[in-house]
């Protein structure tokens, strides 16, 4: 890596002065690896010191077609002469709603917001209004944004919350379905309305749902929780249990929407929920998100229906026409022939190569996820839910080498999140070759 430039250091000094912790609150690197991104194009990003990285962060997922995509930029630029915000109906938002309803299996109607957090929050609110019940169930370790219902048992037992003892096969956490708020400032009444279940454990989840069925409005789940895929039959069983107990099923497809398939995880796994939230790819790299679902539920947003259960949902920049133009162009490109085939082939090659390299180096590992979204854990332990990741994180090899692995990749021009690699249509042969060489360097460090 190049030495940090004076200009980049000046920016970092200003960040320390004017931002809490010198951070925007998202992914931040520290020490000699601290950086400020100057620009991005295609599958690459550059910092202000001139370091170039193959980008597997992709803006936390949305930039699947690459940064500064020419067709998306042209669509935005062409539209800007018509204005940028109206707060009334606009053509791009209507056309995008049509496209979304045709693409997403559960979508009869669509409502817009500006972030994944807003989308999941509104899914929960309309579900409670529809069912006239207060409780919701989420899965331990499941990420649904930053609202008060979402940050319940998101990181229990980790360094992000009160320290818990992890010893052998025992995690000092409360029994299900008791939630743990992850941050201060959450009202106890909110925590009391949330139930927690273990992902991929259908038996325990069914017991909780049956016990609280008269209080539960909805179950919200990431169909692929972070990078943990559902076990065979888990989503199907969840769909069956919620239907039998008259409870709504919500898919959080902020990450998986338009990523696993054009119809999202619903199409990929073949299970259709009642409601869903999506953003990231669906927003075309702009602040845009969607709530979609069955017509009878979504019609609670209809102010002219005369229903007493009308649910107010507005936002100054929700359905912003410029964002909708970017989203339309993005999903048009995503449905072109060969896009998903190429993405999955790229990811499969990287996964297989990484697995072979780690096996040859006799390094314990589990590569978790689907071909377009995955990462490695340095453990032989099977990873099927959040507590498995806690156990793995406490194992000596993983604990000592996680930071080394990510840092060495960064120093060799590969940018990724802590436990996640997003594979995009933008990644090409040169990116794969560069990444494989970085894998080899990182394996040398971990092996030593």
Image (cartoon, grey):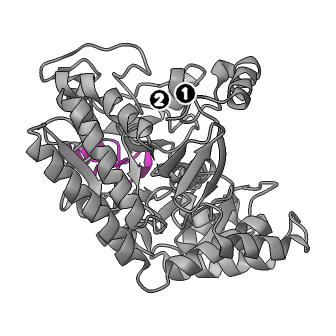
- Answer whether residue 219 is magenta in the image: yes
Q: Nearer the viewer, residue 241 or 447?
A: 447
Check disc 2: other Cα within 10 Å, few if <14, some if 14-19, many if 20+.
Answer: some
Residue 102 position, x and y percent, is 53, 83
Q: Disc 1 on helix, strand or loop? A: helix
Figure label count: 2
Q: Magenta residues, as a range?
A: 205-229
* Residue 271 shows in this picture: no
Q: Is residue 150 above or below residue 437?
A: above
Instruction: Identify residue for label 2.
Output: 192
Mark-to-mark CA distance, 2 and 1:
5 Å
Q: Position of residue 317 (x, y in %)?
A: 79, 56
Q: Residue at x 65, y 32 (%)?
A: 24
Q: Is residue 369 visible?
A: yes
Residue 103 pos. (x, y %) = 50, 79
Query: Residue 379: which quarter of the image?
Result: top left
Residue 52: where, in percent of width, then height? Answer: 54, 47
Residue drawn at point x = 11 percent, y = 40 percent: 361
Could you tell me if the residues under marks 2 and 1 are in contact, i.e. CB atoms within 8 Å? yes
User: Is 268 on the left-hand or right-hand side of 99?
Assistant: left
User: Which residue was labeled with disc 1?
Assistant: 189
């Amino acid at each position: 890596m190049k030495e940090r430039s004076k200009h980049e250091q000046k920016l970092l000094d200003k960040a320390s002065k004017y931002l809490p912790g010198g951070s925007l609150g998202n992914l931040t690197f520290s020490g000699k690896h601290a950086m400020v991104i100057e620009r991005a194009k295609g599958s690459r990003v550059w910092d202000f010191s001139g370091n170039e990285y193959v980008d597997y962060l992709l803006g936390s997922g949305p930039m699947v077609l690459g940064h500064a995509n020419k067709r998306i930029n042209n669509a935005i630029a062409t539209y800007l002469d018509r204005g940028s915000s109206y707060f009334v109906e606009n053509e791009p938002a209507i056309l995008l709603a049509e496209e979304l309803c045709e693409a997403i299996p559960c979508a009869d109607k669509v409502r817009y917001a500006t972030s994944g957090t807003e989308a999941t929050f509104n899914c929960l609110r309309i579900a409670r209004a529809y069912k006239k019940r207060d409780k919701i169930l989420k899965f331990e370790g499941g990420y649904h944004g930053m609202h008060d219902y979402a940050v319940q048992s998101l990181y229990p037992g980790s360094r992000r919350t009160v320290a818990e003892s992890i010893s052998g096969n025992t995690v000092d956490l409360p029994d299900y379905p008791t939630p743990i708020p992850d941050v201060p400032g959450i009202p106890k009444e909110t925590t009391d309305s949330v139930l927690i279940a273990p992902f991929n454990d259908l038996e325990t989840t069914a017991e909780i749902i049956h016990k609280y069925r008269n209080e539960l409005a909805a179950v919200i789940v990431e169909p692929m929780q972070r990078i943990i895929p559902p076990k065979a039959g888990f989503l199907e069983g969840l769909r069956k249990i919620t239907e039998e107990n008259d409870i709504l099923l919500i898919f959080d497809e902020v990450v998986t929407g338009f990523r696993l398939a054009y119809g999202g995880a619903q199409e990929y796994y073949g299970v259709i929920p009642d409601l869903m939230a999506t953003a990231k790819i669906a927003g075309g790299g702009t602040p845009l998100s969607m709530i979609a679902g069955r017509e009878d539920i979504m019609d609670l947003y209809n102010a002219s229906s005369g229903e007493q259960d009308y649910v107010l949902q507005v936002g100054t920049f929700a359905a912003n026409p410029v964002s909708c133009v970017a989203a339309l162009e993005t999903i048009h490109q995503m449905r072109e022939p060969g896009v998903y085939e190429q993405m999955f082939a790229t990811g499969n090659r990287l996964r297989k190569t990484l697995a072979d390299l780690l096996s040859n180096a006799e390094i314990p590992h589990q590569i978790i996820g689907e071909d377009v979204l995955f990462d490695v854990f340095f453990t032989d332990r099977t990873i099927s839910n959040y507590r498995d990741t806690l156990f793995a994180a406490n194992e000596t090899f993983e604990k000592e080498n996680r930071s080394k692995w990510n840092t060495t990749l960064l120093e060799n021009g590969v940018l990724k999140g802590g436990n996640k690699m997003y594979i995009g249509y933008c990644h090409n042969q040169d990116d794969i070759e560069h990444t494989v060489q970085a894998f080899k360097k990182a394996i040398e460090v971990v092996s030593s």
